[in-house]
Image (cartoon, grey):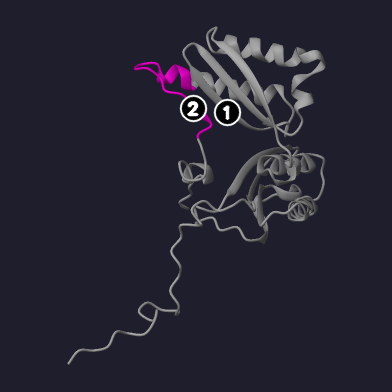
Amino acid sequence: MGQKVHPIGFRLAVSKDWQSRWYAPQGDYASQLHADLKVRRYLESRLQKGAVSRVVIERAWNSVRVTLHTSRPGLIIGKRGKDIEDMTADISRICNGAQVKIDIHEIRQPELDSAWVAAQVATQLERRVSFRRAMKRAIQTAMDFGAEGIRIRAAGRLGGADIARAEAYREGKVPLQTLRVPIDYGFAEAETTWGIIGVKVWITKKDEVPGEGNKRPRREGGHRGQGGPRPARRD
């Protein structure tokens, strides 16, 4: 059995933040948690694949704020804002009549957003594009837009094979164990005629590394104890 850790949960409170931000009173945690799950499933079923990269839910006293991170805000708003009004009413019904406000945050460079990249690769797999071609094209596009590194992994019945397997491609630097490096993680599923194929994407961005200025200078010398001349010995 492999011992896996979720990339976002591994970096919480270090370089990532929670996607649900609220504090429930005693005895009300389970109902609010299930309401959040229903809201996320509702948005996933209503909107197109890849339209929303991340959903952040914040709660206050009898009010819910939903922030949608997307690269196509016009697709969510709809004509004259009718679609977003319908979504507001439906989410309010799911949250037991709470006052709901939907904010839309536009993603300027979707080619560097891991969830968007994973959704694009999954869409191409559903259209029977070769998985190698789709993955390599996504890697090349991300590197052209200035990514430090990218890794893509697809698992399932790739190419319609009888036996499921996993294929991964990587380019650049993707240090998964270094928490201070800003790594974006995304996941999507391709519903093909042979079954579901999962696509995982890790992207290393060129953001400034937090705490780099306070980092202690490294001592010269390759091994411990070889950092400089030793003090003179006393007789």
Q: Residue furthest left?
A: 235
The residue labelled by disc 1 is: 56
Counting from the top left corner in percent of width and height, residue 235 is at: 17, 92
Q: Is residue 151 above or below residue 83?
A: below
What residue lies at 60% left-to-right and 22% top-to-bottom? Answer: 66
Q: Is residue 60 magenta?
A: no
In the image, taking residue 72 as reference, residue 223 lies left or right, namely left
The answer to whether residue 161 of the structure is visible from this angle is no
Counting from the top left corner in percent of width and height, residue 78 is at: 79, 18
What residue lies at 62% left-to-right and 61% top-to-bottom? Answer: 173
Q: Is residue 74 above or below residue 166?
A: above
Dot label at residue 21: 2
Residue range corresponding to the magenta coloring: 18-33
Q: Are marks 2 and 1 in contact (CB under 8 Å)?
A: yes
Residue in front for this viewpoint, 228 or 101: 228
Secondary structure beneath dot 1 equals: strand
The answer to whether residue 206 of the structure is visible from this angle is yes
Q: Residue furthest top?
A: 97
